[in-house]
Image (cartoon, grey):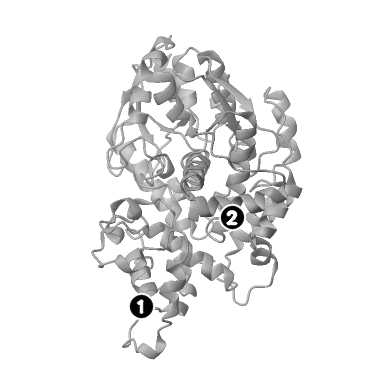
Amino acid sequence: MAELRYAFFLGCTIPYRVTSYEVSARKVAAKLGIELVEMQDFNCCGLPIDPISHDAMLLLAARNLCLAEQQNLNITTLCTGCAITLRKVNRTLKENKELKETVNKHLKEVGMEFKGTIEVKHFAHVLAEDYGIEKIKQHVKKPLAQLQVSEHAGCHFLRPIEYAGFDNPEDPTVLKGLIEATGAKYFDYMDKTNCCGFTIIAIDDEISLQLTGSKLSNMHDAGAQAVVTVCPSCFLMFDVQQPRIEKVFGKTFSMPVLHYTQLLGLAMGMSAHELELDTHRVAATNMLSKIG
Amino acid sequence: MGAEQGTELKIKETIRSSRLDRNFPKEVMKSHGGEKLLLCYLCGSCAGGCPVGRLTTSYNPRQIVRMASLGLKDEVLRNNSLWFCTACFTCTDRCPQGLEVASIIRVIRNIAAEEGIVPQVFKELGSNILETGLAYKIPELRLKKREEQKLPPLPPSDTKAVDKLLEASGFLKLIKEQPKKEA
């Protein structure tokens, strides 16, 4: 097994609004024996400005990759957007010599060079691939057998397949395996792999709310008691926007939204408070009473 | 920016060749991700799988690809619906011709930005990155709360390096100059 030590790329959304994800991930990682090493002076991965400047995105991403190269560590991140961006740029620069030269010309100005010595993986990817489902199961002290959950993996966990590349985006199984490892019952629902719409909420909020809302509606109808996410942006749509979505749909979902690290933390015997589940917009009280 | 203004990408009259910018497809194809633009045979797999297209007739990736390949530059660049793509990449993964449809949309957006069409949200995100290195300005209170949460302090970004890189990429002028026309 590879050394379980990673440069921890925090990104922007998590320290800005979704610290419950960071808190729960750090606690779970520590208990599993996965070391998360801080990255000093990292910057935005670049994805938010890719729509207006692909070149700017490339340089921002490349700088982060260089920081991890200097630490001689592979990167892991909790954000699917950061993960796909850094993965894509990392591979592109490794494969495209000409582009690498151009990028390095600019990086030289800030005293850096992209060498292509590391890999990038989302934290859930690390858990499933580097750590392993069987080993996770050994840490489950309190199987969540009473819990029925659905997943929203998030587009960039799965797509584009060319760069995400470790799950089938049309019929994903990685997050399902991770959820089932906690003992929880996994509930499928219609349009499971659809987008939450986060990236266009500032362009057209109506479309975004419809996208997340129809997913909430489908998983609610399927009988899910909670939804598990692995992306801070998707989380904001499902949790923070849920009251607005309920108004638009004229329906009450009261669907608790859990970061996968919280679900796993609960199964490992940590309390909801410890995992900051009580900081979410949608109360998880009912769900928690089911698991005792 | 509302959904109601100028979002219908409809060409009602005959398209005359004099209206086409023959250079535009070439412009798209020379950018990373836009290379396969002309391989599209209009099967509609992208539009069929598009989650946004299911909710609004205003956005149709096949139409944008077709208009770009014809050279209807202004019509494509100056339409709000260009910004409706969520970058979910379903179209890219399902395209039988291997077009990176979502990347083609991004290339076209990049060209629009160069022409001064930049939706406000990207100016905000861009300014935040210039100022702090991160896409959001993290409030003081949040930073202090990290102590209570027993989280390590958030390391400040090297904004000097970030700004230098953004300047080299030509990014500054996209968000700082007055746009010719608001998107």
Residue at 48% from the left image edge and 33% from the top image edge: A121
Q: Which of marks 2 and 1 is in front?
A: 2
Q: Which labelled disc corresponds to residue A281?
A: none
- Residue that numbered label 2 is attached to: A102
Looking at the image, can residue B115 be seen? yes
Marks 2/1 in contact by CB < 8 Å: the verdict is no
Judge by depth and name the residue closer to the eye, A23 or A82.
Answer: A82
The amino acid on which the numbered mark 1 sits, given as a three-letter code, is Leu
| Residue A240 in view here | no
Residue denoted by label 1: B70
Q: Is residue A214 above or below residue A267?
A: below
Q: How crowded is mark 2: few (under 14 residues within 10 Å), some or many (20 or more)?
A: few
Across and down, in percent, residue A202 comes to: 54, 57
State whether discs 2 and 1 lie on one chain: no
Please tell me whether mark 1 sits on a helix, a strand or a loop: helix
Image height check: is A92 above or below B66?
above
Chain of residue at mark 2:
A
How many discs appear? 2
Out of A183 and A154, give the one closest to the viewer: A154
Amino acid type for the residue under numbered disc 2: Thr
* Residue A193, horizontal then vertical, whole percent: 33, 43
